[in-house]
Image (spheres, grey):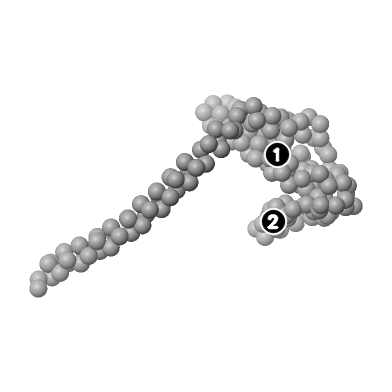
Amino acid sequence: MDKRVQSIIDTVKAEALKLKDIEKDKAVVKQVCQDVQNELPKLKELSTDKVKSAFNLYFVDYLKNNYMEFGGRISRRQYWMFALFSILVGIVIGIVAGIIPILSPVSVLYLLAILVPSIGLAVRRLHDIGLSGWFFLISIIPYVGMIALLLLLCLPGDAKTNAYGVAK
């Protein structure tokens, strides 16, 4: 058999194997689409009023009332909702600053303005799991420190009263 013919046969076999993989991929895509369709009704329940009230409760109220609060405890939900809204606001400011370059200093000012409350929330979150706020300094250790802090912030809080206050 000619080498060219053998090469064509090998190519056809390889393409046939790819078609089998495509069938598997189609099944996965079909399942993902079904999952998305099942989740859509839940998204319809999410109203702008709920988002606004969550934004006001977890972000705006905290900045207005507890800007430099380092004592006490906060729940995991409070911490991560503040983090979520901080990131979203930062993204919006970054996009606007990218479109209108003269507003670039606004993104830096936002980062500086959110720094103290973010540290305060992390300290209070550490209090919720029964650790001293000084554990925040573990983040100074390159790579490992930030991962360790992230894991600590994800832990569930103490259900009972601890040295830092009443559970929320």
Q: Residue at x 67, y 60 (%)?
A: 144
Q: Residue at x 68, y 40 (%)?
A: 81
Q: Relative to residue 99, is residue 14 drawn left or right?
A: left
Label 2: state its secondary structure: helix
Q: Calculate the distance from the C-alpha at mark 2 to the C-alpha at mark 1.
A: 17 Å
Would you place residue 70 above or below residue 148 in this image? Answer: above
Residue 16 showing in the rendered view: yes
Q: Residue furthest bottom?
A: 1
Q: Give the quarter of the image for residue 106.
A: top right
Q: Nearer the viewer, residue 78 or 97?
A: 78
Q: Relative to residue 153, is residue 39 drawn left or right?
A: left
Q: Relative to residue 66, is residue 53 drawn left or right?
A: left
Residue 105 showing in the rendered view: no
The disc labelled 1 sits on which kind of residue? Phe
Say which label, 2 or 1, has the lower sequence index.
1
Whether the residues at callouts 2 and 1 have beta carbons within 8 Å, the answer is: no
Q: Which mark is residue 151?
A: 2
Label 1: state its secondary structure: helix
The disc labelled 2 sits on which kind of residue? Leu
- Residue 120, how many percent across, how many down? 79, 43
Q: Residue furthest left?
A: 1
Tell me the residue that label 1 is attached to: 82
